[in-house]
Amino acid sequence: MEKGKENPITEYTEITAVHEAGHCFAAYHFGVAIHCVGLGNTKLSKDVKLSEEQNCVLCMAGVAAEIVFFGKPVPQSASKDRHDCVKHFPGGLDNMEKYGRVDQYMEKAKRLIVQNHHIVNVIREKLRDEKCLCGEEVAFIVESARRET
């Protein structure tokens, strides 16, 4: 049986791989240890202290990747990631929106994804095909892709 027929790539798989690749690359970019990234979940080390901006960009990077790759976010992922972003901001969502920070962090996340599109794409492809990557694999993918540019 052909590999593609054994494990067909569904729309869900493709969207989820893009989303998690966005979070994964942002985490790597900010120096957060990645335990594993799978379709639907990225497990990160809690040991690294990030700034509010870094935390929120990391939270929004999955949705940012969806926008960069597909032109629009998946509504349910946008809502969850926005909620996760708010947890890192004193004063909650009302205060955050008042100062436009949600939009600022989304723009920064999109810039990060656009500037590193080729790397995020390689992570996406590997994750789509393998379904799960460990931190060492992510580091190898990112560093290999950086050398190719």
Image (spheres, rainbow, N blue to C red):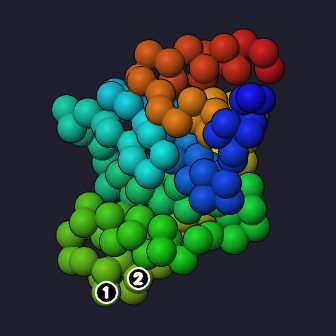
Q: Give the residue drawn at x 45%, y 40%.
A: 38
In the picture, which quadrant includes the N terminus? Answer: top right
> Dot 2, how many residues are within 10 Å of its Cα: few (below 14), some (14-19), or many (20+)?
few
Q: Are marks 2 and 1 in contact (CB under 8 Å)?
A: yes
Left/right placement of residue 122 relative to residue 79 reads: right
Give the residue type at disc 1: Asp
Examine the rendered structure and indicate whether residue 84 appears above or below residue 22: below
Residue 123 lies in quadrant: top right
In the picture, which quadrant includes the C terminus? Answer: top right
Give the residue type at disc 2: Glu
Q: Give the residue drawn at x 69%, y 45%.
A: 8
Q: Position of residue 41 (x, y in %)?
A: 39, 47
Q: Position of residue 136 (x, y in %)?
A: 44, 16
Residue 4 visible in rendering: yes
Q: Residue furthest front?
A: 1
Q: Position of residue 14 (x, y in %)?
A: 66, 51
The numbered mark at residue 94 is 1
Q: Give the residue drawn at x 31%, y 48%.
A: 51
Residue 109 lies in quadrant: bottom right
In front of the other: 65 or 11:
11
Label 2 secondary element: helix
Examine the rendered structure and indicate whether residue 120 appears above or below residue 130: below
Q: Which residue is mark 2?
A: 97
The numbered mark at residue 58 is none
> Dot 1, how many residues are within 10 Å of its Cα: few (below 14), some (14-19), or many (20+)?
few
In front of the other: 31 or 122:
122
